Image (cartoon, rainbow, N blue to C red):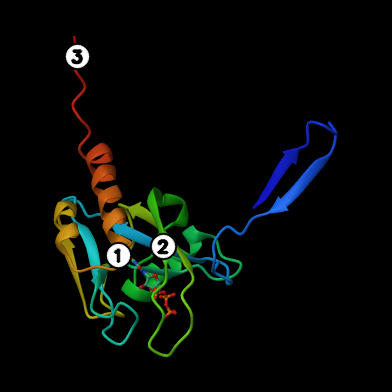
Amino acid sequence: MWQVTVNSKLNAMVELTEYPTHPDPPVAPALLVAAVALIDGQGHVLMHQRPHSSVHGGLWEFPGGKVEAGETPEAAAAREMAEELGIAIDPAALCPVGFASGMTVPSSTGGSSRSLVILLYAARQWTGEPQLHEGEAMAWLDPHRVPALAMPELDYPLAAALIAWVEKNLFPPSVERR
Ligand SMILES: Nc1nc2c([nH]c(=O)n2[C@@H]2O[C@H](COP(=O)(O)OP(=O)(O)OP(=O)(O)O)[C@@H](O)[C@H]2O)c(=O)[nH]1
């Protein structure tokens, strides 16, 4: 971060001072992950249990994965839905719900922690029946029950954002008519 100081005596002199933003800043670019809350006709959301062998193994998450080079987050989300659940989603039909930001958990094989940003989208339409292609299990849940699951840390704020989104978009307060 740069601080600009104007020296009043010399009037036009500008001093630039560099300040460290963090004692140990992350060196790698942020990892971007696109995840999807699939919402069925009953307003239930599909949660996915990560493979035991993976980072965050056995925890519940919103299905999704890393955005690859040259991909939009929406295209990545649609690709992950095909890979993980065997369903087709139109990227244009994904609705932004919220995001969460933190640090990755270093894998058991090493590697340092890096900045992680997860974008959560909602989808109410897709083609095909979700099937477990990867992971340990999947479950359709009332969104209000999601915060009770064992999940990666960033999924708790994502779950709160989803509940707010569902209450606004699926069950909007009735409009008072005079
Ligand atoms: N998909 C997904 N990943 C999440 C969530 N919450 C969360 O912390 N993550 C983390 O974000 C990262 C995404 O990794 P991933 O393993 O799902 O991505 P991927 O399918 O591209 O993995 P791959 O490297 O095996 O191809 C992991 O560190 C994962 O633990 C979530 O709700 N959904």
Q: Looking at this rendering, what residue extends furthest in the front direction? A: 9
Disc ID at residue 168: none
The mark nearer the N terminus, 1 or 2, is: 2
Task: Return the disc, 3 or 2, that comes first in the chain's sequence.
Answer: 2
Label 2, secondary structure: give it.
strand
Please name the residue shown 49% across and 71% down the image.
Answer: 114
Can you tell me whether the CB of the residue at mark 1 lies under 8 Å from the nearest atom of ligand 1?
yes
Residue 73 at what x, y percent from top left? 49, 60
Query: Do the residues bearing badges 3 and 2 touch, measured as CB atoms within 8 Å?
Result: no
**Circle number at residue 102:** 2
Please determine whether, in this image, residue 29 is positioned above or below residue 20.
Answer: below
Quadrant for ligand 1 reads bottom left
- Between circles 3 and 2, the one closer to the viewer is 2
At x 41% / y 52%, what residue is drawn? 94
Please tell me whether residue 36 is drawn above or below residue 26 in the rendered image: above
User: Is 127 in front, or is 79?
Assistant: 79
**Local secondary structure at mark 1:** loop
Q: Which residue is mark 3?
A: 177
**Three-letter code for the amino acid on which mark 1 is drawn:** Glu
The residue that mark 1 highlights is 153
Does any atom of ligand 1 lie closer than 8 Å to the CB of label 2? yes
**What amino acid type should be assigned to the residue bearing mark 3?**
Arg
**Location of residue 71 (image quadrant):** bottom right
